[in-house]
Amino acid sequence: MTVADAVRGHWADRFIPPGLRPYARLSRLERPIGWWLLLWPCWWSAALAAGASGARWPDPWHLVLFMIGAIAMRGAGCTYNDIVDRDIDDKVARTRSRPIPSGQVSVTQAKLFMALQALVGFLVLIQFNGFAILLGIASLGVVAIYPFMKRITDWPQFVLGLAFSWGALMGWAAVFGRLDGAAFALYAGAILWTIGYDTIYAHQDKEDDAIVGVRSTARLFGRATRPLLALFFLAAVIALGLACRLAGAGMAAYGGLALFAAHLAWQVVRIDIDDPDLCLMLFRANRDAGWLFFLGLVADAALGRL
């Protein structure tokens, strides 16, 4: 069986044995944008901390660990979300063909698969220092409540931001074994960015969401999405700039941030909330926006903060 919102012709469908494909879809393996967006705050934080510590490069081992952890925990999160949302997914055209509502995977099987992915994430987490381990465990509370937020608040994107941006704290903690103002400012900027890009994403489903009672900032903002999106993206850039300042960053970091800001401005100009395909394209484009800021931070560390 196919899934309506799966990426067509992806290697996961071409090379993974048919019996395992529903699990690949549970973890959204064919849609890497999710783990990229989870990874960026981790890598930003690692690069910002590298510069602040006087290192020329972010710790390569940390970058690898964060990538493995992002892929595993994004998969576990998506599986958990599908378990919690199985009744809602069955009522939405785009999601009713997902593995659980379509019967390809039972709830028990999904729970076991979620536990396996979470175990991988835990094995990654214990490679860091004790403070970072405790900090990573603390994130689970936010992750656990997120799927329920769309039922009780118009701001589930804010709660997603709290969860998806946790890496902004982790990268710094992995280097220094503590949290400082720069890490908190980075976290705030990543949350604001997440609210923006996930609002764009949520506009794909706003009609179905209205029918089944799912709430979102896309429905809340409505026709005011463009100016509010600009406001959130501007606030994100300001917060990220503050993080750079508090970390003593140099011109290369601000150059990367300027390119990141230009990319977000392009999204605001291009958005058409009544064009689901365009909304999806703009949402996915945030992977490239993340690269721009990250490369600026890496260059800043490499250049010795000139």
Image (spheres, grey):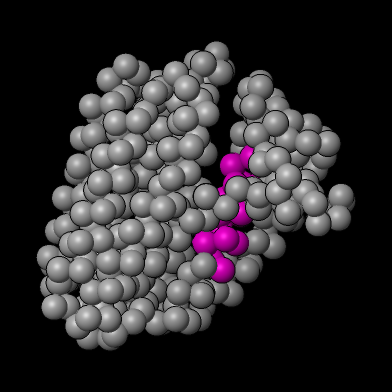
Q: Eyeballing the image, is 243 above or below 59?
A: above
Stretch of the chain drawn in magenta: 68-83
Report if residue 172 is visible in the image. Answer: no
Residue located 34% across and 37% down the image: 267
Point out the image quarter for the C terminus.
bottom left
Give the x, y percent position of residue 15.
Answer: 81, 57
Residue located 73% across and 45% down the image: 9
Report if residue 90 is visible in the image. Answer: yes
Residue located 36% across and 44% down the image: 194
Q: Eyeballing the image, is 45 above or below 227?
A: below
- Quarter of the image holding residue 170? bottom left
The single residue placed furthest to the bottom in the displayed view is 55
State whether the magenta stretch is mostly helix, strand or loop.
helix
Give the x, y percent position of residue 236.
Answer: 23, 47
Depth check, front residue: 33 or 265: 265
Depth check, front residue: 228 or 277: 277
130 part of magenta stretch: no
What count of labels does the image hold?
A: 0
Q: Eyeballing the image, is 143 above or below 271?
A: below
Q: Eyeballing the image, is 196 above or below 276?
A: below
215 on left or right of 299: right
Point out the image quarter for the N terminus.
top right
- Quarter of the image holding residue 293? bottom left
Residue located 77% across and 49% down the image: 13
70 part of magenta stretch: yes
143 on left or right of 302: right
79 on left or right of 11: left
Give the x, y percent position of residue 156.
Answer: 41, 35
